[in-house]
Amino acid sequence: MTGVDVAESAIALARQNLAHQRLGASLSVGDGEALPFPDAAFDFVFAHGVVQYTADDGAGPGVPARPHARRTACFQVYNRLSWLNALSRVMHVGLEHEDAPVLRKYSRASSRPAPGFSSVRMVYERFPVKSRLHGGWKGALYNRLFVGAFNAVPRPLVRRFGWHLLAFCQK
């Protein structure tokens, strides 16, 4: 297993977690847009919460890591049509990382990974759960009204509004 992150703190935390789990991996600080690996170096590439911050996604998630995947890859990006985007606008509550130099949000139609994958299966995930991040009337309204109402609606009707889009790609 190999892990790369642009943040030294993320690598340090991953090392602690691996030590706690008694697992090993090669971890390094690096730029995800210029990975130092040869093409087809890995059987599986997993990029969770990475691609939406890349300056050049090449018209779709997965472009920076695509050549490194020999067989399969999974790319997670933010869903532009999500419940969280809508709620943040209505409630005037900012989303985390909005101050990032680059932050892209994708729709299902725009989330097709770059050429090179023969099949792609899109999955929506991360539906609302109670939160302690926001207090006051907005937090109470979110936790008591919104979460309950959203989760009472049959999942097939709200599935496409998940906060994350996961692209499971096969070469």
Image (cartoon, rainbow, N blue to C red):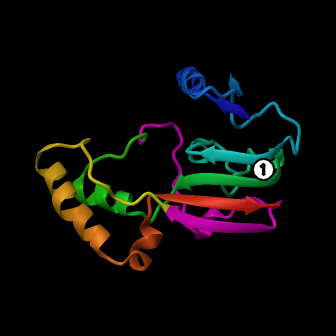
Q: Nearer the viewer, residue 18 or 164?
A: 18
Tally of numbered tags: 1
Percent position of residue 42, x then y:
82, 43
State the quadrant of the C terminus: bottom right
As helix, strand or loop, the secondary structure at mark 1 comes to helix
Which SS type dominates the magenta stretch?
loop
Residue that appears at 40% across and 79% down: 157
Percent position of residue 8, x then y:
58, 20
Residue that appears at 47% across and 71% down: 160
Does the stretch in magenta take in 61?
no
Q: Give the residue at mark 1.
A: 66
Give the residue type that dot 1 points to.
Answer: Arg
Q: Nearer the viewer, residue 124 or 154?
A: 154
Does the stretch in magenta take in 122?
yes
The answer to whether 9 appears left or right of 58 in the picture is left
Span colored in magenta: 98-124
State the quadrant of the N terminus: top right
Q: Nearer the viewer, residue 38 or 126?
A: 126
Q: Nearer the viewer, residue 127 or 25?
A: 25
Q: Quadrant of residue 18?
A: top right
Percent position of residue 16, x then y:
55, 21
Q: Residue furthest left?
A: 137
Q: Quadrant of residue 4?
A: top right
Percent position of residue 80, x then y:
47, 61
Residue that appears at 74% across and 45% down: 65
Residue 43, placed above or below residue 162: above
